Image (cartoon, helix red, strand yellow):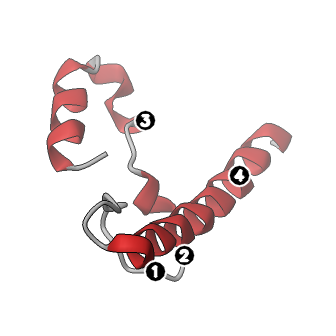
Amino acid sequence: MDWDNRALLEERCPAQHLHKVRGLAEFLQTSKASLTPGPYYGGYQGFEQVLDLIEEASESLMKLLLQKAQA
């Protein structure tokens, strides 16, 4: 989701749920990316970089979800 997609989503989101809208990059722990970029312009290396970001963020997201489920 890029910034334009997020803005459109936030416009359509009911106010009481707006706090739930989050980007995958918000779950990154070691990388400093502010969003998960599209890999299409970086060749093979671009896809590898984005995959690394997705794996890192997904791991953090799963930990958060498991903590919430156990609470």
Q: Which residue is mark 2?
A: 29
Q: Earlier in the sequence, mark 3 or mark 1?
A: 3
User: In the picture, residue 39 is in which quadrant?
Assistant: bottom left
Quadrant containing the C terminus is: top right
Q: How much space separates mark 4 and mark 2, taking CA atoms?
A: 13 Å
- Residue contact between numbered discs 1 and 2, judged by CB atoms under 8 Å: yes
Q: Which residue is mark 4?
A: 62
Q: Earlier in the sequence, mark 2 or mark 3?
A: 3
Q: Position of residue 24 (x, y in %)?
A: 45, 53
Q: Which residue is mark 3?
A: 20
Q: As drawn, is 25 to the left or to the right of 30?
A: left
Residue at image coords 45%, 67%: 47
Q: How much space separates mark 2 and mark 3, taking CA atoms?
A: 19 Å
- Mark 3 or 1: the one toward you: 1
Q: Which residue is mark 1?
A: 31
Q: Earlier in the sequence, mark 4 or mark 3?
A: 3
Q: How much space separates mark 4 and mark 3, taking CA atoms?
A: 16 Å
Q: As drawn, is 61 to the left or to the right of 19?
A: right
Is residue 46 in view?
yes
Task: Report helix, strand or loop for mark 1.
Answer: loop
21 over 24 or under it: above or below = above
Task: Report helix, strand or loop for mark 4.
Answer: helix
- Mark 4 or 3: the one toward you: 4
Q: Earlier in the sequence, mark 4 or mark 1?
A: 1
28 over 17 or under it: above or below = below
Q: Amino acid at mark 4?
A: Met
Q: Amino acid at mark 1?
A: Ser
